Amino acid sequence: DAKTTQPPSMDCAEGRAANLPCNHSTISGNEYVYWYRQIHSQGPQYIIHGLKNNETNEMASLIITEDRKSSTLILPHATLRDTAVYYCIVRVQGGTSYGKLTFGQGTILTVHP
Amino acid sequence: DSGVTQTPKHLITATGQRVTLRCSPRSGDLSVYWYQQSLDQGLQFLIQYYNGEERAKGNILERFSAQQFPDLHSELNLSSLELGDSALYFCASSGNRGYEQYFGPGTRLTVT
């Protein structure tokens, strides 16, 4: 699985958009970008994933650069409950044997009132 | 609520003992994963089972073992416990496509 690099911490004001970057310059053509978050000692929570097109769901948007070497997770209107550690993970998608998620250090996002 | 349940929530035991952690996956999910989260190592993948069979192995110690039963629930057995085994243990499950993994609330193990 490709290695990812994320800033250790970021701050965001409540109600503003939170943009969390991730570098994955060694990503392979068959590897997807996944985002998970972990709110203080709770189980990690799946947010979104994508291959090369931008993706949006009810939680967030994922913007992947054309060369796929980096991506940005966007929380459009951050709330205090979005304070968490956000993990960017790159891995081969699907199948029954490719389940392993390799978590890095992630980005600690703190949303301020 | 992810639909994945884990028991017990907390476990305190002494060094040298053996414990069993239990996980029930989301309804219909065939894959179960175990992860360990300690302060110094972060979140680490231990092992994956798919429909009763071991499919992938990570940084799992020989003192640890797991299995998945016909009803798809899984158990993680930790033996000869050491102080360093104190950690949060998470179970996750996923469907056939294996896209998203849904994590349980975890079991906090404290070895004294």
Image (cartoon, coloured by chain):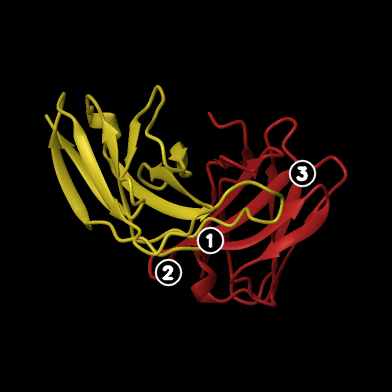
Chain colours: A yellow, B red
> Which numbered marker is on residue B73?
3
Residue A4 appears in the rendering: yes
Q: Residues within 10 Å of mark 1 (few under 14, many from 20)?
A: many
Identify the chain of the residue marked 1, using the numbered disc in the image.
B
* Relative depth, front residue between A34 and A27: A27
Dots 2 and 1: beta carbons under 8 Å? Answer: yes
Q: Amino acid at mark 1?
A: Gln
* Most distant residue in the front direction: A66
- Is B112 rendered above or below residue A90? below
Label whose residue precedes the other's in the sequence (2 or 1) = 1
Label of residue B17 in the image: none
Residue at 22% in and 56% down? A7
Q: Is residue B103 visible?
A: no
**Amino acid type at image mark 3:** His
Amino acid type for the residue under numbered disc 2? Gln
Residue assigned mark 2: B41
Query: What is the C-alpha distance between the residues marked 3 and 2?
Result: 26 Å
Gap in Å between the C-alphas at discs 2 and 1? 9 Å
The chain under label 2 reads B
Which residue is under mark 1?
B36
